[in-house]
Image (cartoon, helix red, strand yellow):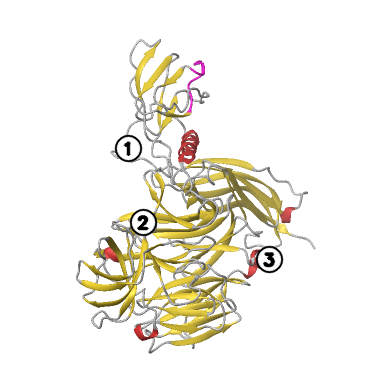
C-alpha cells in the first residue's frame, strides 16, 4: 500500500552502494539521497553534498560499511585523504545479504513516499477512477475544495496532482439543417468558443427542432447572449442565454462506469454519478454534465448496459436512448421504471442477445430487468428479503454483493429465474453484524480471485474464490480507512487497484512491503489438527514448512499442543529467515549483482517437541520491509503413541 502519484516510483528501482575509505567526499550534479550511511570510523558530517537543496549531510554507519544511495546516483567530483580517485557509484559494489537489501529498499521507499502529496482540498477522497486513454494509463480523483463548497477534479501528472478545469455550458433550441460536431467553432456575432461536446437531448436536426446543450471553452470576445448562432459544420441554433460555468457540489460519493458508445478506441469515456450532482461524461479533458429531466437531478448509481446508460435515483431507474447517453425523453428512446424500493446498485448479468439481464439491487430486495430495449423490458422482483448494501455490487466471474447477513453470490443456474443466490460468510456473522451500515467501498482483484469490502473504521474483508469455489475470507486492518476504490487493467496487462482514503490520499493497493511506511503485521492460526487420528497421542518431533516467494521473508513459527494444555511440553516460538530470491542462471545475471543461494520455493525445518492428540500452528510477521510470501504447507514429523484413556 503506497500513496500514489504519477511521477514517482511505487517501488524502488535500484540501490547503489559504495565502499568508502576514511576520508572526505564531495558530490555534485543531481543531489543524492543517502538511505544508510558510512562505514565505521568516518565522523558524521564528513560527507558533503553539493546542490541547491542537500538532502542528507550525515548518516549512521551500516553493518557492512559503504554508502547506500537511491534516486539519482551521484558523481564524486573531489575527495581528500585518498591516493586515487574513487569514481562513480552506479551499482552495488559491496556484498550485502538479502535482509539488509530489503531494509535498504524500504528506507529508499520512505524517501519517495515523503515526496508524494494528496490532491489539494479537504476531507476524504470522494472518488478515484483509472482508465486507459489513447494507450496511456491515467488516474483521476475527486476531492472537496477548502471550505467544502465544491468538488474538484484532479489528474495525476509527472509533477503531481493537477486541477482539471471545468468547462462552460450553453443551452440551445431550434437547431436545424446540419448537425454540429465536437470541435466546431460556435459563433454568435463577435463572440467565439470551441464546442467540446454536443449534448443533443431531444428533437430533430433535420426538422429544426433539436434541443440540447453545448459544452464549450471560455468564449473569446465576451459572453454569449440569447439569439442565433452558427457552427463551422454549418449548423444553425438559437442560444437560450449566456454560458454558465460547470460546477460540482461537494458532499457526494462518486461511482463510475467506463464504456464506449461509439465503438472506437478514441471514444472511450468515463461516466459518473455521486448522488448530489447530475451525472456526467468525462473524456480525459472535458467534463460534460448529463441532464436527465429529473428534479432534482442527482442520480446515485450508474451502469452501462445494452448500449444504454442506466441511472438510479431513489426508487427510480432511468435509462438513455440506445447509443446516446444524453437523451432520456421517452419519445427519443429513453425511459423510467419505478422499482418500489431504493436502488443500491446495478450490474450486467449473463444472458444472450434476446435475454439480456440487468441486475437491479434494492435495499431489501433483488430484481432483474430482462430485455434488450424498452419494447422488450420486463422488470421482475427475484428475491424478496435479500438486498444489497450500496457500493457493494461487483462482478468477478459471478456477481457478489453484501447483504445485511453477509456476502452473497449470485450464480447462474438452469433453475427457474436463471440465477441462484447463496451466502458465503455465515461463519463470520458477528463481524458482518458489527460492520452493518459501515461499508464505504468494494472492488475485485482478478489476479487474486478476490472480492473485497472496505469499511469506515479501516477494516476490510477479502473473500477468495478459486475455480468458482469459495476458499475463505480474511480480515485486513488498514491504518487509514478507505472511502472509494477502482480496479483497472493497465496498458501493460497487469492489474492496479487505486483507493481513495479518508485522509485525502490516493493509495495503490497490493504493492510495496508496508502500510504506507508503517509495519505490516500479519498472522494466521490454523484449526486444531489431529492428523487423521483423533484421540491418538502423537510424539511430535519436527515440522517442514514449505514457503514460496521471490524476495527475503521472515516470520515467527509457533505451535500449541493438546488444545493449548499448558502441562504439555513444547518449544517457544522461533524466527525463521528465508532468502526466497530467484536462483540465477548462467548468462542471465551481472557479477556482484546477484545472490548465489536464492530459492523461490523453500522447505524449512523446525523442531517440535511434545506429546498430545492434536496440534495448532501460528505464523506471524510484522515489518515494513518483507514482501509477500506464500505458506504452501506444513508437514509434521511424529511418532504414534497410544490411544487416550477415558
- Crowding near the residue tagged with mark 3, few <14, some 14–19, many ≥20 C-alpha atoms within 10 Å: few
Residue 504 position, x and y percent, is 53, 51
Q: Nearer the viewer, mark 1 or mark 2?
A: 2
Q: Is residue 13 visible?
A: yes
Q: Mark 3 to mark 1: distance in Å?
A: 52 Å
Residue 387 position, x and y percent, is 57, 76
- Crowding near the residue tagged with mark 2, few <14, some 14–19, many ≥20 C-alpha atoms within 10 Å: some
**Residue closest to the eye, 491 or 609:** 491
Q: Nearer the viewer, mark 3 or mark 1?
A: 3
Q: Is residue 354 visible?
A: no
Q: Main secondary structure of the magenta part?
A: loop
Mark 3 lies on residue: 430
Ranked by sequence position, the earlier of labels 1 and 2 is 2
The residue under the point 26% across, 67% down is: 264
Q: Quadrant of residue 612?
A: bottom right
Mark 1 lies on residue: 589
The residue under the point 38% across, 21% down is: 27
Ranked by sequence position, the earlier of labels 2 and 3 is 3
Q: Which mark is residue 490?
A: 2
Amino acid at each position: 500500500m503506497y500513496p500514489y502519484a504519477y511521477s514517482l516510483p511505487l517501488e524502488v528501482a535500484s540501490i547503489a552502494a559504495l565502499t568508502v575509505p576514511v576520508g572526505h567526499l564531495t558530490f555534485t550534479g543531481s543531489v543524492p539521497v543517502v538511505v544508510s550511511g558510512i562505514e565505521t570510523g568516518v565522523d558524521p558530517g564528513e560527507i558533503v553534498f553539493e546542490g541547491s537543496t542537500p538532502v542528507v549531510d550525515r548518516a549512521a554507519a551500516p553493518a557492512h560499511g559503504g554508502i547506500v544511495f537511491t534516486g539519482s546516483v551521484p558523481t564524486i567530483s573531489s575527495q581528500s585523504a585518498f591516493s586515487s580517485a574513487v569514481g562513480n557509484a552506479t551499482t552495488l559494489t559491496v556484498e550485502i545479504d538479502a535482509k539488509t537489501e530489503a531494509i535498504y529498499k524500504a528506507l529508499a521507499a520512505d524517501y519517495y513516499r515523503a515526496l508524494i502529496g494528496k490532491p489539494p482540498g479537504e476531507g476524504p477522497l470522494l472518488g478515484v477512477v483509472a482508465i486507459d486513454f489513447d494507450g496511456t494509463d491515467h488516474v483521476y480523483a475527486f476531492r472537496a475544495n477548502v471550505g467544502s463548497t465544491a468538488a474538484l477534479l484532479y489528474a495525476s501528472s509527472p509533477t503531481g496532482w493537477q486541477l482539471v478545469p471545468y468547462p462552460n455550458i450553453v443551452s440551445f433550441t431550434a437547431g436545424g439543417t446540419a448537425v454540429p460536431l465536437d470541435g466546431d467553432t460556435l459563433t454568435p456575432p463577435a463572440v467565439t468558443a470551441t464546442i467540446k461536446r454536443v449534448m443533443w437531448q431531444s428533437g430533430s436536426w433535420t426538422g429544426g427542432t433539436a434541443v440540447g446543450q453545448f459544452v464549450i471553452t471560455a468564449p473569446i470576445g465576451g459572453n454569449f447572449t440569447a439569439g442565433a448562432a452558427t457552427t463551422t459544420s454549418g449548423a444553425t441554433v438559437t442560444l437560450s442565454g449566456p454560458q454558465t460555468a460547470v460546477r460540482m457540489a461537494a458532499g457526494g460519493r462518486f461511482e463510475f462506469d467506463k464504456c464506449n458508445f461509439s465503438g472506437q478506441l478514441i471514444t472511450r469515456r468515463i461516466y459518473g454519478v455521486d448522488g448530489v450532482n447530475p451525472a456526467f461524461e468525462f473524456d480525459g479533458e472535458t467534463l460534460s454534465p448529463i441532464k436527465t429531466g429529473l428534479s432534482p437531478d442527482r442520480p446515485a448509481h450508474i451502469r452501462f448496459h445494452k448500449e444504454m446508460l442506466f441511472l438510479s435515483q431513489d426508487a427510480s431507474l432511468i435509462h438513455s436512448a440506445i447509443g446516446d447517453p444524453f437523451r432520456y425523453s421517452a419519445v427519443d428512446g429513453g425511459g423510467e421504471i419505478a422499482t418500489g424500493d431504493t436502488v443500491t446498485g446495478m450490474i450486467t448479468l449473463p444472458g444472450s442477445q434476446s435475454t439480456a439481464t440487468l441486475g437491479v439491487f434494492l435495499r431489501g430486495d433483488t430484481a432483474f430487468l430482462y430485455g434488450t430495449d424498452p419494447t422488450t423490458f420486463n422488470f421482475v422482483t427475484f428475491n424478496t428479503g435479500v438486498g444489497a448494501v450500496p457500493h457493494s455490487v461487483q462482478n468477478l466471474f459471478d456477481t457478489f454483493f453484501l447483504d445485511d447477513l453477509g456476502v452473497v453470490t449470485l450464480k447462474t443456474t438452469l433453475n427457474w429465474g436463471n440465477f441462484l443466490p447463496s451466502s458465503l460468510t455465515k461463519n463470520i456473522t458477528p463481524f458482518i453484524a458489527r460492520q452493518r451500515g459501515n461499508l464505504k467501498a468494494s472492488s475485485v482483484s482478478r489476479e487474486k480471485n478476490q472480492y473485497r469490502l472496505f469499511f469506515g473504521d479501516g477494516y476490510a474483508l477479502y473473500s477468495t474464490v478459486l475455480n468458482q469455489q469459495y476458499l475463505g475470507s480474511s480480515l485486513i486492518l488498514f491504518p487509514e480507512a478507505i472511502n472509494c476504490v477502482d480496479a483497472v487493467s493497465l496498458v501493460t496487462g497487469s492489474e492496479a487497484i487505486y483507493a481513495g482514503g479518508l485522509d485525502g490520499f490516493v493509495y495503490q493497493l497490493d504493492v510495496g512491503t508496508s502500510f504506507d511506511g508503517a509495519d505490516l503485521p500479519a498472522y494466521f492460526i490454523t484449526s486444531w489438527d489431529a492428523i487423521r487420528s483423533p484421540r491418538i497421542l502423537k510424539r511430535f518431533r519436527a515440522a517442514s514448512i514449505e514457503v514460496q516467494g521471490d524476495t527475503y521473508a521472515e516470520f515467527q513459527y509457533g505451535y500449541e499442543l493438546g488444545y493449548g494444555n499448558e502441562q504439555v511440553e513444547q518449544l517457544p516460538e522461533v524466527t525463521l529467515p528465508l532468502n526466497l530470491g530467484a536462483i540465477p542462471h548462467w548468462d542471465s545475471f551481472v557479477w556482484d549483482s546477484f545472490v548465489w543461494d536464492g530459492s523461490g520455493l523453500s522447505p524449512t525445518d523446525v523442531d517440535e517437541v511434545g506429546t498430545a492428540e492434536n496440534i495448532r500452528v501460528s505464523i506471524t510477521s510484522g515489518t515494513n520491509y518483507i514482501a509477500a510470501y506464500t505458506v504452501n504447507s506444513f508437514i509434521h514429523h511424529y511418532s504414534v503413541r497410544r490411544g487416550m484413556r477415558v
